[in-house]
Amino acid sequence: MTHDLLGRHRAVLPDWLALYYEEPIEITHGEGRHVWDAEGNRYLDFFGGILTTMTAHALPEVTKAVSEQAGRIIHSSTLYLNRPMVELAERIAQLSGIPDARVFFTTSGTEANDTALLLATTYRRSNTVLAMRNSYHGRSFSSVGITGNRGWSPTSLSPLQTLYVHGGVRTRGPYAELSDGDFIAACVVDLVDLLGHTRPPAALIAEPIQGVGGFTSPPDGLYAAFREVLHERGILWIADEVQTGWGRTGEHFWGWQAHGQHGPPDIMTFAKGIGNGMSIGGVVARSEIMNCLDSNSISTFGGTQITMAAGLANLTYLLEHDLQGNARRVGGLLIERLRAAAAQVPAVREVRGRGLMIGVEITRPGTDEADPATAAAVLEAAREGGLLIGKGGGHNTSALRIAPPLSLNVAEAEEGAAILEDALRSIP
């Protein structure tokens, strides 16, 4: 049955629509932190549909909210008052830390970043954008234009002039050998120098932890130091929280808070986990930025009632059960367990991350050379052992990405770590 479905997939869908595994699997249902495929195999899910299943599969509170809302009305568009949308916007505005915040809902992180770019370039009357090397911000025409990762950038054409800044990757590049303080100082000098050679940019867009880039990050405080430079020049800071938001990093509710010494970002984007699998994205911005557009705009599907009901129920569950605290505690145990295992595997260059956002970088032993073939082999071996993980990376895709639902318990963390350890040790 799965082989037949694969043939049908290949016959009608694009060749560039990637599938994991030499023998792709069809996931048919899930519960808690586990999913099952069409052949009846059970897996511990450490990737959550690319960080979207944030709390748990088939979470009763979310499925109940979706079912009840579907029985009333599913959709009406933003042309009508929408109580669930207003209620979720109120909660997100309060949680964002942005003063006098306004919230606009979209259907994805890509669309959220598109909207943020529209707002920033309109507000600043500039189409120049600063972005980070190794970044990823979506698959639309404008978001591809600011993505600093060749593997996810299929065209050099763009409506924007994009300039790439140092600093998103701590352990690679020209400043890798510096101390954290000197690393930040060098990146700031580079930013100031870059600004001296270009027209005034609209904004800097940055992921606090780079997701598709392999869960890489700068030292805490880098974007605070950048913000000080940007603020002096009126340049906006856009924090892309599509993967880092909602407490996944454990230490903070938003990734930007590790860089918050000079205040919150001017614009913040979010998506993925808030819907627990339902399509929700959005933008939070100060009112004068959000309200700067001088033409009509609506969203047909952004903020639709059924997704807002899911988001409200999911956010309530997350807060009431302190899943941020759980990510900090269980994630801390998991990362230490993986570091201990990786110490015995020469192909593991680094285990990094925080909370339940962990990257394991695979290289050719004794070098810094990426090894995508070995990373793919570990991905396969983990699946055979009953564990689903992701992959990513910068110059080449050789980082394993681990991002389970935030309700992961200690026993499941130990089980997943043991499976991944066996997969790593299977490397020839």
Image (cartoon, rainbow, N blue to C red):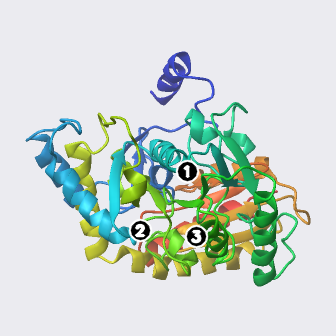
In the image, which is nearer the foreground, mark 3 or mark 2? 2
| Number of dots carrying numbers | 3
Q: Are marks 3 and 2 in contact (CB under 8 Å)?
A: no
Within-10-Å neighbours for mark 1: few <14, some 14–19, many 20+: some
In the image, which is nearer the foreground, mark 1 or mark 2? 1
Q: Are marks 1 and 2 in contact (CB under 8 Å)?
A: no
Q: Which callout, 1 or 3, points at the residue further toward the start of the chain?
A: 1
Q: What is the x, y in percent for residue 310?
A: 25, 53
- Marks 1/2: CA distance? 38 Å
The residue tagged 2 is 406
Using the image as rendered, state which of residue 135 and residue 123 is in the foreground. Answer: 123
Q: Amino acid at mark 1?
A: Arg
Q: Which callout, 3 or 2, points at the residue further toward the start of the chain?
A: 2
In this picture, residue 230 sits left or right of residue 50: right
Check disc 2 and report its element: helix, strand or loop.
loop
Using the image as rendered, state which of residue 406 and residue 293 is in the foreground. Answer: 293
The residue tagged 3 is 417
- Marks 3/2: CA distance? 16 Å
In this picture, residue 200 sits left or right of residue 90: right
Q: Quadrant of residue 174?
A: bottom right
Q: Which callout, 1 or 2, points at the residue further toward the start of the chain?
A: 1
Q: Amino acid at mark 3?
A: Ala
Identify which residue is drawn at 14% across, 44% down.
Answer: 81
Q: What is the x, y in percent for residue 226?
A: 66, 70
Within-10-Å neighbours for mark 2: few <14, some 14–19, many 20+: many
